[in-house]
Amino acid sequence: MSCRRCGTCCAKGGPALHGADAALVLDGAVGLDQLVTLRAGEPVHDQLQDQILPLAAEIIKIRGPHGLTGCVFHLGANAGCSIYQARPLECRLLDCENPAPLAEVYAIDRLTRTDLLGPGHSLLELIRHHDKLCPAAEAFRLARDPALSTRRALAELLSADRALRSAFLDKTGASLHLADFLLGRPLPEVLAPLGLRLSL
């Protein structure tokens, strides 16, 4: 089947990147500020199982436009994809009527921040510090516990995440989108889709 270019898959979210897609970033077809990191432990919608599950390991995805769901490279109805000739592996394999080829590679050889930055990159120290200080899995665990003491711990975690992001942006002048690649999504954004109340 050939792609009808209806945009349905593009509107649902950007693809996760795999080893075969590293060249797209290295060659500049996809910029780091067009990516978002979903960290280990984040609750996400698993497309194949059609349920929300915590991630076993981090993945890198193409972000949506202006923080919205979808793919930043999708140009809208009937307009197609702005990087169609250099689209990622998942986009090339997706067939609305036959999901088997995509399912075969779905969880294999997914790229990480270390893969894209390189093992000796100076920003990896910041990434490790943030992951240790503000683990997504711990935020998810705390957010599901109604105890007041747990709510205080969650408030401290959210505050630490906000402060570290703010300090990074102030010191580097980097964009919010680049911060979403380097540090993953802000914790309130990670937890919000589950309907968890974060008014602490």
Image (spheres, rainbow, N blue to C red):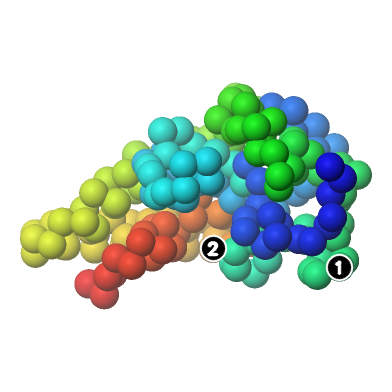
Image coords of residue 70 (percent x, y): 65, 61
Image coords of residue 42 (percent x, y): 40, 47
Give the vertical position of 9 relative to 195 (above or below).
Answer: above
The image quadrant where one finds the N terminus is top right
Disc 1 residue type? Answer: Asn
Residue 14 can be seen, yes or no: yes
Give the vertical position of 95 relative to 171 (above or below).
Answer: above
Residue 18 can be seen, yes or no: no
User: In the figure, is residue 150 to the left or right of 4?
Assistant: left
Residue at x-position 86% and y-position 68% = 78
In whole angstroms, how far apart are the C-alphas of marks 1 and 2? Answer: 40 Å
Tell me the SS state at disc 1.
loop
- Identify residue for label 1: 78
Task: Report which quarter residue 198 is drawn in.
Answer: bottom left
Q: Earlier in the sequence, mark 1 or mark 2?
A: 1
Task: Report which quarter residue 163 is drawn in.
Answer: bottom left
Residue at x-position 49% and y-position 37% = 58
Disc 2 residue type? Answer: Asp
Image coords of residue 15 (percent x, y): 66, 46
Image coords of residue 166 (percent x, y): 47, 63
Task: Report which quarter residue 162 is drawn in.
Answer: bottom left
User: In the figure, is residue 81 to the left or right of 130?
Assistant: right
The image quadrant where one finds the C terminus is bottom left
29 or 11, which lies in front?
11
- Identify residue for label 2: 170
Tag of residue 99:
none
Classify 10 Å Cα crowding around label 1: few (below 14), some (14-19), many (20 and above).
few
Tell me the SS state at disc 2.
helix
User: Closer to the observer: label 1 or label 2?
Assistant: 1
Give the vertical position of 128 relative to 159 (above or below).
Answer: above
